[in-house]
Amino acid sequence: MGAVTNVVYLIASVLFILGLKKLGSPKTARQGNVYSMLGMLLAIVITLLDQRIVDFTYIIAGLLVGSVIGAIAAKKVEMTQMPQMVALFNGFGGIASTFVAYSEFVTKLSENLPVGGTDVVVSLVLSLLIGTVTFTGSMIAFLKLQGWMPGRPIVFKGQVAFNGLLLAGTFVLGWMFGMDTMNGQTFLLVIIAIAAVLGVTSVIPIGGADMPVVISLLNSYSGLAAAATGFVLSNNVLIISGALVGASGIILTQIMCVAMNRSLANVLFAAVGTDSGSGASGGGEQRNVTRYTADDAAMIFENSESVIIVPGYGLAVAQAQHVMNELMQLLEKRGINVRFAIHPVAGRMPGHMNVLLAEANVSYDKLVEMDAINDDFQSTDVALVVGANDVINPAARYKKDSPLYGMPILNVDQAQRVMIIKRSLATGFAGEDNELFYDDNTMMLFGDAKKMLTDIVKILKDE
């Protein structure tokens, strides 16, 4: 049975790798999900058979309950709540690793068996530490994204030093546990308690603008926790799958940091961001803008040959992705070239805009990454911005005291005409006023994105 188990584990691992590879492109992401799910199914089935579990009552019950909860969540959760759901899933993955690793220790303790060598002891401590930090940190991320706690950074004096002491304390306790594993259960429980606090205090100082980085980092943590648990259980497929998730999460985190031109340390410790970007204009000087209407926008579109649409979180909030797709189709029928410019950190989780537009059946060929489309703005008639702010703010280029300084942005200000659909002149998460709003070349269309786009679509249909 052992040889068969290893072969099936190998097949599952290959499916995981293929799944991750295909998840790298919107065109193949669904196929990647299928590969990954098939790999996990094989891993679960062969593990249950290999362990010779006779009574499957609790396992079947868990599968049914989990499947029902997952299906309901997938159907009911709206696109605006997708980042919260991902945060929850990261947290559940982390706490699952904690439970499994701790239960393995308790089982060996009850049977008066040795915990294992140094590698197992270290893996056990790391699993409890990382898994619990992932859980409580993800819960804080969920509460911030859900709006149940302030999205702004929450800091206190000596916070970084306090977190460092907590982390050092877990290492000391881990060493003490390693000295006497048979009587060290209390040490493990204290490690879990400290890790729970560390997860909270390490995420509360991170502002809403940095949530995409936090989510990808916590995703990496959940993978690392799973890999550590795999060493505790001597389970190869868990080690491989956890390592894959951990590595891909770290890579994605780095991509997010590069997209903002900030280091990971700056994201974690600099406490950048406002409460929710809902305040008034960031500058002390009151400046006037001209309010344009849907009729004005429709007239501009009628005389255009190329349009680049820049989606942001406001598009998700308004649930306007479907009417946006309808507008795109209307413009294309008129012979207008329409594309979407996707900034890596637009939205509140990695790939948020891709997922949002995919739900509205926008062709993947229409979604163009920032680096590939930025030079095209200068030859574009209209740049239509819906719900984006910080990722188009020119202050990132020149204002050295701005939290956005140095962040690559979409060059919408180089288009012949810029249309911005927004509820108000409120700043983005970084709290930086956007001078593009006041530019003579900018048309500000104030109001709900869905209603504004619907009005534009109606006017174009009637003409």
Image (cartoon, grey):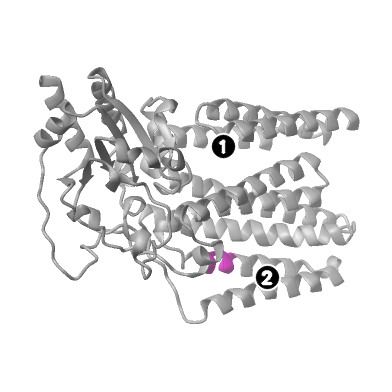
Image vertical order of residue 35 relative to residue 182, above or below: above
Residue depicted at 76% across the width and 66% down the height: 185
Q: Given the current orientation, which residue lies at the most extreme bottom position?
A: 157
| Image point (31%, 33%), residue name | 321
Find residue 149 and report its horizontal and vertical position in percent. Answer: 38, 62
Segment colored magenta: 196-202
Badge 1 element? helix
Q: Quadrant of residue 14?
A: top right
91 to 371, vertically: above or below: below
Horizontal side, residue 134 vs residue 403: left or right: right
Q: Which residue position is annotated with label 1?
A: 66
Mark 2 and 1 residues: CB-CB less than 8 Å, in contact?
Answer: no
Q: Amino acid at mark 2?
A: Val
Residue 74: image location, x then y, percent: 46, 34
Q: Main secondary structure of the magenta part?
A: helix
Return the mark for residue 400: none
Quarter containing the C terminus: top left
| Badge number at residue 190 | 2
Kind of residue at badge 1: Gly
Dot 2 or dot 1: first in sequence order is 1
Check the image and name the residue furthest to the top.
333
- Crowd class of label 2 (few under 14; some 14 to 19; many from 20; radius 10 Å): some
Q: Nearer the viewer, residue 304 or 16?
A: 304
Q: Is residue 352 magenta?
A: no
